[in-house]
Image: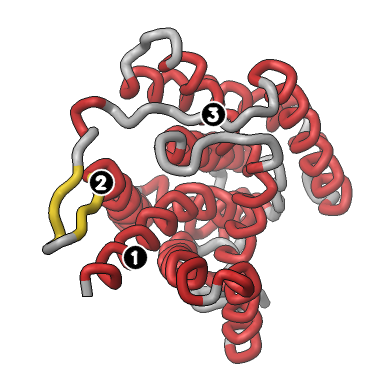
Amino acid sequence: MDLFIVNTLSGLTYGMLLFLMASGLSIVFGLMRIINLAHGSFFLFGSYVAYAMVSRGMNFWLALLLATICVTVLAFLLEKFLISRFHGNEASQVLLTLGLIFVIGDISLWIWGGDFLSIPVPSIMDFSFAINESSFPIYRLFVIAIGIACAVLLWYFETKTKVGMIVRAGVDDMEMVGALGFNIRLIFTAVFLFGAALAAIGGVLSGPILGMYPKMEFEILVNSLVIVLIGGLGSWKGAFIGAILIGIIDSFGKIYLPDVSVLLIFVVMVIVLMFKPTGLFGRVES
């Protein structure tokens, strides 16, 4: 029973990290119709920047804030000077963001090298709590809480604020929102930066758990795309449920079926899409 509880909590921890990454990816696609493959680079770059700061003695929480700001600025520059130039041209956007993954990955490799790196757990959370004869790190429980808090924040933003209603309307009918006089360009940029910030937060929080290594962005990106497809394009709620599902499957799969643990994730995706081609919370576009 102890092992079941620990594995479930480990799966939820990984799931919440994926949720922070996948929710932004899904919202950006839902509103902007951009499959931003460089989103995985925001995740990894954020963790590398935080590592550079923490390794020089900076407080973890300050490093989290500054790394998120750095990634958001990077996302702003990429969106303004590159991605926005190809709006409506999906093939060019995919190729561009795919190229950005390699560029940012090579820059990270040049700066931080190819070794496995890790961010130390903040000292205030460097302990575990007992689960009968087992134990579980309190930091991972904190990550779960952050993921749930972000989900609540997204729910409030979407349903209780005017900006959230505009974004939701934009996902359904972008042209209609523009015709009502709202600044679509500004909304696009704000949503893109919000998604990048979430990815950066997820990347920094993952530093003490997953560490950082070259090509990690591809691994995170693939799992996030699976979550977006399971949950439905443009739905943060779908990303939340999908991330929990994939996190749990990944955790138990690596223990009980290690040889096919990766395959299990795609099997689940195929099963969901067979019965719900638009994903769990996706809608058929008119």
Percent position (x, y) of residue 164?
41, 51
Quarter placement of the N terminus: bottom left
Quarter placement of the C terminus: bottom right
Residues at marks 1 and 3, CA–CA distance in whole angstroms:
24 Å
Foreground of the two, 159 or 2: 2
Within 10 angstroms of label 1, few (less than 14), some, or many (20 or more) residues? many
Residue drawn at x 39%, y 25% is: 64
213 relative to 229, above or below: above
Judge whether residue 172 can be spotted in this image.
no
Tell me the number on the disc at residue 46.
none
Tag 2 secondary structure: strand
Foreground of the two, 218 or 7: 7
Residue type, numbered disc 3: Leu
Within 10 angstroms of label 2, few (less than 14), some, or many (20 or more) residues? some
Which quadrant holds residue 120? top left
**Image position of 136 (left or right of 106):** left
Q: Earlier in the sequence, mark 3 or mark 2?
A: 3
Percent position (x, y) of residue 159?
33, 58
Residue drawn at x 36%, y 11% is: 58
Tell me the number on the disc at residue 117.
3
**Image position of 203 (left or right of 103):** left
Residues at marks 3 and 2, CA–CA distance in whole angstroms:
20 Å
Residue type, numbered disc 2: Pro
Do the residues under discs 3 and 2 have CB atoms within 8 angstroms?
A: no
**Image position of 187 (left or right of 84):** left
* Label 2 sits on residue: 137
45 relative to 7, above or below: above
Residues at marks 2 and 1, CA–CA distance in whole angstroms:
12 Å
Residue type, numbered disc 1: Asn
Tell me the number on the disc at residue 7.
1
Residue drawn at x 20%, y 59% is: 134
**Image position of 108 (left or right of 134):** right
